[in-house]
Image: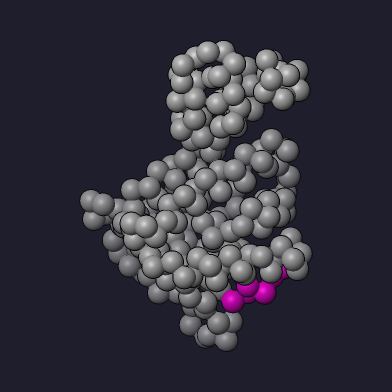
Amino acid sequence: MTQVVRVHPGAIGQRLERARRIPRPEFLDKADEVLGAGGKIAAMKKDVAEARYPKKVRDLARLESEAVELCAYNNSVIQGLLQTEEYARASFMTRRPPFTTDELEGRVAARMARQEILDDSTARPVFSFVQCEATLRRPIGGRMVMRRQLERLLEVGQLRNVDLQVLPLSREDNTGLDGSFRLLRLKDGTTVGHNEIQLHGSRWSSSKKCGERRDP
Protein backbone atom coordinates (compact mmCIF):
# COMPACT_ATOMS: atom_id res chain seq x y z
CA MET A 1 0.00 0.00 0.00
CA THR A 2 2.86 2.38 0.80
CA GLN A 3 4.08 2.09 -2.79
CA VAL A 4 0.65 2.75 -4.27
CA VAL A 5 -0.15 5.81 -2.16
CA ARG A 6 3.47 7.02 -2.25
CA VAL A 7 4.20 7.50 1.42
CA HIS A 8 7.18 6.44 3.50
CA PRO A 9 6.72 2.89 4.87
CA GLY A 10 7.07 4.16 8.43
CA ALA A 11 4.57 6.98 7.97
CA ILE A 12 1.48 4.75 8.14
CA GLY A 13 2.45 2.80 11.24
CA GLN A 14 4.30 5.47 13.16
CA ARG A 15 2.25 8.56 12.33
CA LEU A 16 -1.11 7.80 10.74
CA GLU A 17 -2.15 4.69 12.69
CA ARG A 18 -1.03 6.26 15.96
CA ALA A 19 -2.86 9.51 15.14
CA ARG A 20 0.34 11.53 15.22
CA ARG A 21 -0.36 12.86 11.76
CA ILE A 22 -3.66 13.61 10.05
CA PRO A 23 -3.93 12.05 6.55
CA ARG A 24 -4.44 14.33 3.58
CA PRO A 25 -7.62 14.08 1.44
CA GLU A 26 -5.74 12.56 -1.50
CA PHE A 27 -4.37 9.83 0.79
CA LEU A 28 -7.89 8.92 1.92
CA ASP A 29 -9.10 8.76 -1.69
CA LYS A 30 -6.24 6.47 -2.70
CA ALA A 31 -6.57 4.31 0.42
CA ASP A 32 -10.29 3.90 -0.31
CA GLU A 33 -9.48 2.77 -3.85
CA VAL A 34 -6.65 0.40 -2.88
CA LEU A 35 -8.55 -1.22 -0.01
CA GLY A 36 -11.83 -1.43 -1.93
CA ALA A 37 -13.72 0.40 0.81
CA GLY A 38 -16.47 1.55 -1.51
CA GLY A 39 -16.27 5.20 -0.51
CA LYS A 40 -16.35 4.64 3.25
CA ILE A 41 -12.80 5.90 3.80
CA ALA A 42 -13.14 8.77 1.34
CA ALA A 43 -16.34 9.83 3.14
CA MET A 44 -14.27 10.60 6.22
CA LYS A 45 -12.51 13.53 4.54
CA LYS A 46 -14.69 16.20 6.13
CA ASP A 47 -14.30 14.80 9.67
CA VAL A 48 -10.57 14.30 9.14
CA ALA A 49 -10.21 17.84 7.80
CA GLU A 50 -11.79 19.22 10.97
CA ALA A 51 -9.42 17.10 13.06
CA ARG A 52 -6.52 18.96 11.46
CA TYR A 53 -7.54 22.04 13.44
CA PRO A 54 -6.42 22.58 17.02
CA LYS A 55 -9.52 22.64 19.25
CA LYS A 56 -9.62 26.44 19.57
CA VAL A 57 -9.39 26.73 15.77
CA ARG A 58 -12.21 24.19 15.33
CA ASP A 59 -14.41 26.24 17.64
CA LEU A 60 -13.61 29.43 15.74
CA ALA A 61 -14.19 27.74 12.37
CA ARG A 62 -17.59 26.55 13.61
CA LEU A 63 -18.56 30.09 14.62
CA GLU A 64 -17.38 31.43 11.26
CA SER A 65 -19.52 28.87 9.43
CA GLU A 66 -22.57 30.00 11.42
CA ALA A 67 -21.96 33.73 10.95
CA VAL A 68 -23.99 35.97 8.65
CA GLU A 69 -21.61 38.87 9.26
CA LEU A 70 -17.96 38.89 10.27
CA CYS A 71 -16.02 42.01 11.20
CA ALA A 72 -12.30 41.81 11.97
CA TYR A 73 -9.56 44.23 12.95
CA ASN A 74 -5.87 43.29 12.83
CA ASN A 75 -2.91 45.37 13.90
CA SER A 76 -0.04 42.86 13.79
CA VAL A 77 -0.50 40.60 10.75
CA ILE A 78 -2.86 40.22 7.80
CA GLN A 79 -6.16 38.68 8.91
CA GLY A 80 -6.03 34.87 8.68
CA LEU A 81 -8.93 34.59 6.21
CA LEU A 82 -7.03 36.90 3.83
CA GLN A 83 -3.58 35.30 4.02
CA THR A 84 -1.79 33.52 1.21
CA GLU A 85 -0.29 30.14 2.04
CA GLU A 86 3.24 31.56 1.91
CA TYR A 87 2.38 34.41 4.24
CA ALA A 88 0.55 32.10 6.66
CA ARG A 89 3.54 29.74 6.81
CA ALA A 90 5.96 32.63 7.36
CA SER A 91 3.84 34.08 10.17
CA PHE A 92 3.54 30.72 11.90
CA MET A 93 7.31 30.25 11.63
CA THR A 94 7.88 33.33 13.80
CA ARG A 95 6.27 31.56 16.76
CA ARG A 96 8.48 30.88 19.80
CA PRO A 97 8.81 28.15 20.86
CA PRO A 98 8.56 26.97 17.25
CA PHE A 99 5.98 24.50 15.96
CA THR A 100 7.15 21.07 14.86
CA THR A 101 7.05 20.45 11.10
CA ASP A 102 3.78 18.51 11.39
CA GLU A 103 2.23 21.17 13.63
CA LEU A 104 3.31 23.91 11.23
CA GLU A 105 1.85 22.18 8.17
CA GLY A 106 -1.32 21.36 10.09
CA ARG A 107 -1.80 25.00 11.09
CA VAL A 108 -1.21 26.22 7.53
CA ALA A 109 -3.62 23.63 6.08
CA ALA A 110 -6.28 24.55 8.64
CA ARG A 111 -5.95 28.24 7.88
CA MET A 112 -6.26 27.66 4.15
CA ALA A 113 -9.30 25.42 4.66
CA ARG A 114 -11.07 28.11 6.69
CA GLN A 115 -10.88 30.45 3.72
CA GLU A 116 -13.53 28.41 1.91
CA ILE A 117 -16.16 30.68 3.48
CA LEU A 118 -14.79 33.57 1.38
CA ASP A 119 -17.14 32.77 -1.48
CA ASP A 120 -19.11 35.55 -3.12
CA SER A 121 -21.39 33.19 -5.06
CA THR A 122 -23.94 33.41 -2.25
CA ALA A 123 -22.86 36.83 -0.91
CA ARG A 124 -23.11 35.38 2.61
CA PRO A 125 -21.65 35.88 5.07
CA VAL A 126 -20.77 39.54 4.72
CA PHE A 127 -17.19 40.41 5.67
CA SER A 128 -15.75 43.68 6.91
CA PHE A 129 -11.98 43.70 7.39
CA VAL A 130 -9.96 46.57 8.83
CA GLN A 131 -6.19 46.27 8.60
CA CYS A 132 -3.83 48.58 10.45
CA GLU A 133 -1.52 50.23 7.93
CA ALA A 134 1.46 48.68 9.75
CA THR A 135 0.38 45.18 8.64
CA LEU A 136 0.71 46.25 5.00
CA ARG A 137 4.22 47.62 5.54
CA ARG A 138 5.62 44.75 7.61
CA PRO A 139 7.26 42.37 5.04
CA ILE A 140 6.61 39.06 6.78
CA GLY A 141 8.25 36.31 4.74
CA GLY A 142 10.22 38.74 2.60
CA ARG A 143 9.42 41.19 -0.17
CA MET A 144 8.10 38.69 -2.74
CA VAL A 145 5.88 36.91 -0.21
CA MET A 146 4.52 40.28 0.88
CA ARG A 147 3.98 41.38 -2.71
CA ARG A 148 1.85 38.30 -3.42
CA GLN A 149 0.00 38.90 -0.18
CA LEU A 150 -0.86 42.46 -1.19
CA GLU A 151 -2.02 41.18 -4.58
CA ARG A 152 -4.26 38.72 -2.75
CA LEU A 153 -5.81 41.58 -0.77
CA LEU A 154 -6.61 43.38 -4.02
CA GLU A 155 -8.31 40.23 -5.34
CA VAL A 156 -10.37 39.63 -2.21
CA GLY A 157 -11.33 43.31 -2.08
CA GLN A 158 -13.19 42.82 -5.38
CA LEU A 159 -15.59 40.25 -3.93
CA ARG A 160 -19.15 41.53 -3.57
CA ASN A 161 -19.49 40.42 0.04
CA VAL A 162 -16.16 41.82 1.25
CA ASP A 163 -15.42 45.31 2.56
CA LEU A 164 -11.70 45.88 3.08
CA GLN A 165 -10.39 49.03 4.77
CA VAL A 166 -7.02 50.30 6.00
CA LEU A 167 -6.63 52.21 9.27
CA PRO A 168 -3.90 54.86 8.71
CA LEU A 169 -1.03 55.06 11.17
CA SER A 170 -1.65 58.82 11.28
CA ARG A 171 -5.07 58.37 12.88
CA GLU A 172 -5.05 59.63 16.47
CA ASP A 173 -8.10 57.70 17.73
CA ASN A 174 -7.90 53.90 17.69
CA THR A 175 -10.04 51.65 19.90
CA GLY A 176 -8.09 48.63 18.68
CA LEU A 177 -4.90 49.34 20.61
CA ASP A 178 -5.63 46.35 22.88
CA GLY A 179 -4.96 44.04 19.93
CA SER A 180 -6.62 42.25 17.05
CA PHE A 181 -10.23 41.12 17.44
CA ARG A 182 -13.24 39.97 15.47
CA LEU A 183 -17.00 40.23 15.85
CA LEU A 184 -19.33 37.59 14.44
CA ARG A 185 -23.07 38.04 14.11
CA LEU A 186 -24.67 34.60 14.06
CA LYS A 187 -27.84 33.40 12.35
CA ASP A 188 -29.82 33.61 15.59
CA GLY A 189 -28.91 37.29 15.99
CA THR A 190 -26.28 36.73 18.67
CA THR A 191 -23.05 38.72 18.36
CA VAL A 192 -19.89 36.97 19.53
CA GLY A 193 -16.52 38.65 19.99
CA HIS A 194 -13.09 37.04 19.90
CA ASN A 195 -9.78 38.53 21.00
CA GLU A 196 -6.79 37.22 19.05
CA ILE A 197 -3.71 36.84 21.21
CA GLN A 198 -0.69 34.62 20.52
CA LEU A 199 -0.98 31.17 22.18
CA HIS A 200 -4.46 31.92 23.49
CA GLY A 201 -7.56 33.98 22.84
CA SER A 202 -10.74 34.98 24.60
CA ARG A 203 -14.37 35.00 23.51
CA TRP A 204 -17.31 37.02 24.76
CA SER A 205 -20.94 37.59 23.83
CA SER A 206 -21.79 40.67 25.90
CA SER A 207 -23.71 43.09 23.66
CA LYS A 208 -22.15 46.04 25.49
CA LYS A 209 -18.60 44.80 25.04
CA CYS A 210 -19.21 43.88 21.39
CA GLY A 211 -20.56 47.35 20.77
CA GLU A 212 -17.42 48.91 22.23
CA ARG A 213 -15.25 47.13 19.65
CA ARG A 214 -17.18 48.10 16.52
CA ASP A 215 -15.12 51.08 15.43
CA PRO A 216 -11.30 50.91 15.61
In the image, 82 versus 39, the foreground residue is 39
Residue 120 in the image: state x and y as whole percent: 39, 60
Residue 190 lies left or right of residue 71; in this view the side is left
* Residue in view at x 61 percent, y 27 percent: 27
Identify whether 57 is placed above or below 184: above
Count of labels shown? 0
Identify whether 101 is placed above or below 39: below
Quarter that holds the C terminus: bottom left
Residue 98 in the image: state x and y as whole percent: 73, 45
Q: Is residue 26 visible?
A: yes
Residue 194 in the image: state x and y as whole percent: 44, 55
* Residue in view at x 51 percent, y 56 percent: 81
Q: Which scheme is used to colour this image of the protein?
A: one colour
**Is residue 81 a member of the stretch shown in magenta?**
no
In the image, 7 versus 138, the foreground residue is 7
Q: Is residue 183 visible?
A: no
* Residue in view at x 47 percent, y 50 percent: 116
Q: Magenta segment range?
A: 133-140
- When asked about the image quadrant of residue 169, the answer is bottom right
In the image, 101 versus 202, the foreground residue is 101
Quarter that holds the N terminus: top right
**Is residue 137 a member of the stretch shown in magenta?**
yes
Residue 27 lies left or right of residue 186; in this view the side is right
* Residue in view at x 57 percent, y 86 percent: 170
Residue 23 in the image: state x and y as whole percent: 60, 28
Identify whether 15 is placed above or below 140: above
